[in-house]
Amino acid sequence: MSNSTESQQGESVAPETNNGETPSGESWWGDFFRGLWLEVQRRTKSHELTVKEIDFLERAYDLPKGAKLVDAPCGVGRHSIELASRGYNVTGIDITEPFVEDARASSKEAGVQVDWRIGDMRKLPQDSFDVVTCLWGSFGYFEDDGNREHVAAAFAALKPGGQFLFDTHTTETLLPKIAEARAWRQVDDIMVLEERRFDLEGSRTVTDWTLIRGDERFEDTTSIRLYSYREIVMMLRDAGFEVETVSGSLDCDPFTLGSSRLFIGARKPA
């Protein structure tokens, strides 16, 4: 994949992803989660971190015991399974079928019950949930209309008084670190190269990923809409939510410039 080039007229021409869309296009995520990336996502987060994240959810948002909860997108199900093990009534939804298959197998191995479904987080079931979660940086996949549709779907899926909980990078968390734009890391036997740049016109973080294991190689691009804290709060309020709880870390530190990410809880009015 190449970086942006200049046309003869001097206009920026964005690179194409494997599915023919530009990095700011609506469907980069349609075929991204495949091959070596599936293995990286399965291995990246430890069980200890998952426990810490769910401890944070319970502590920061005072989750009602036995709450009816939808986790979307659920990925390989690590949050959904941990929540179900603590007595929550969990529905896990993801558009990537191999992730749902992994999650179903993992929940069976763990001996917990989760309602696994293949689906789009912009089209959540209208089942009067107590809580909707969107965890591990999955907020902002779409163009603005799609992201607003996601927030509206969460609002519609909740019963009055229900909570929408998610974490995401924002301009305040990521732009101070954008100079650290190229980094290698190792996930078990897979080398991962992350090359990140910022699309000023679209306000999106565009990341070129290269994964290597022996002769295997994975290359593709992700594009995540990067909102400011104010923009996120306004989007939530426009959908009808009341923003209640804001943190800058899993230790409940205040959110500020340079925080690790934004953790936010919004409530549907009773």
Image (cartoon, rainbow, N blue to C red):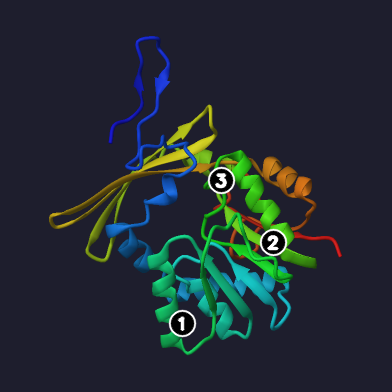
Residue linked to disc 3: 173
Q: CA distance from mark 3 to mark 2?
A: 21 Å
- For marks 3 and 1, the one nearer the N-term is 1
Whether residue 251 is visible here, answered yes or no, is: yes
In the rendered view of the protein, which quadrant contains the C terminus? bottom right
Horizontally, residue 83 falls left or right of residue 29, namely: right
Q: Are marks 3 and 1 in contact (CB under 8 Å)?
A: no
Q: Amino acid at mark 3?
A: Thr
Q: What is the quadrant of residue 265 in the picture?
A: bottom right
Identity, as a three-letter code, of the amino acid under mark 2? Phe
Residue at the limit of the structure toward the left, as seen here: 215
- Residue type beneath disc 1: Ser
Label 3 packing within 10 angstroms: few (<14), some (14-19), many (20+): many
Task: Give the numbered dot on residue 107.
Answer: 1
Q: Which image quarter: residue 99?
A: bottom left
Q: Earlier in the sequence, mark 1 or mark 2?
A: 1
What numbered label is drawn on residue 164? 2
Q: Residue at x 68, y 40 (%)?
A: 231
